[in-house]
Amino acid sequence: MNTLERSGIILMGYYGHDNLGDDLLLLSTLMILKEANVKNEIYIPAPKNIEKLRKSFPKELKIKVIPRYNPYTLERYFHRSCCTIFGGGNLFQDETSTRSFLYYHFIAKRTLKRKNSLAFLSQGFGPIHKQRNRKHLKKILGNERSYGVIRDKVSYRYARRFSKNYQMGTDYGPYYLLKKKLITPNHEKDPELAFTVLKSGTSASEVVEALKYLGYRKLCAVGFHNSHDSQKQMELEDYAVNNGMEIIRPPQNIDGVMELLSKASIVVTERLHGAILATVQGTPFVWKKNRKTNRFVSSLVNDYCFSFNNSLESIVLAINGALRYDFDKLRATYLEKLDETVDRSIKLINKILD
């Protein structure tokens, strides 16, 4: 097969699973590929559910969705490709699933075995508990054909231990929304409105009691991963109603969700992209302590440390601290790093396709 026939790009991520954060990473990656003036075919291994996003794909790109888990189909498209791009997320981790780690390792390993380039864009790494998996990742990161723009300092320092091919960046998930002018920071916040993005690890009763104690009267509970977060969303709404709070139903479209997030005076989140979207919308946020969000925030500034555990006191203290913080400074820092990340990503894409 000649070089012209091997010019496709395999674009990898946790796409098409009704996870708002990962779907935004896909749309932002495609926006960046468009701005890099990519003419190559783009192959996205994903479930059929991803077709719901197709109307938002840039019309200028040639995109083909292929079966995610069919090894014969994947091998056929490896033959047609010149590089693989991992577009956003913390894909190389074995805390939630070793099977998932091994799947992404297989994709990376096959890419490099074919002497194709491998790019990690807006990526973080870990946590990785199994020694064998750490060895796998070390070998991938240390390959001379592996490159990356990494989204947090911990992952960046880790990757740089094995190669100088990595640059520092941030998570570019909201880039698509910014380009589509769906980010509209609102400085006239509703002091009674709280916006939550929680999953199974946070006590709904403690969050509601903390918000009620601090004077919040309205709650908008949103699930960013439809199949996983809906139960927690209902639980929050039940507790809120029983405590006399008004429920603001989240819109079914991203435009409406972003508008509500902009109006809220506080965001309480357990998901990383709840924190990132709050940042870009200029809304103070607090988060249930976890590695991904800790790393994101500490990679921006050193003094925004308003995470909480499941106690009422911890949540109240975190919210009070966040509301006193100069949030315009945090937003400006993120937007500056976002611009740098996009610029470095475009240059890296052009480099590996040259």
Image: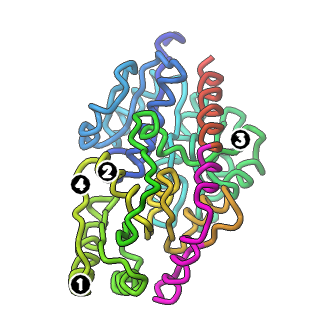
The local secondary structure at tag 2 comes to loop
Image depth: mark 4 or mark 3 in front: 4
Residue that badge 1 annotates: 244
For badge 1, the amino acid type reads: Gly
Image depth: mark 2 or mark 1 in front: 1
Quarter of the figure with the C terminus: top right
Answer few, some or many: residues within 10 Å of disc 2's Cα (few below 14, many 20 plus, some between 14 and 19).
some
Horizontally, residue 351 falls left or right of residue 262, namely right
The local secondary structure at tag 4 comes to loop
For badge 2, the amino acid type reads: His
Residue 132 can be seen, yes or no: no
First in sequence: mark 2 vs mark 4: 2
For badge 4, the amino acid type reads: Pro
For badge 3, the amino acid type reads: Tyr
Residue that badge 3 annotates: 166
**Chain part drawn in magenta:** 306-335
Mark 2 vs mark 4, CA separation in Å: 19 Å
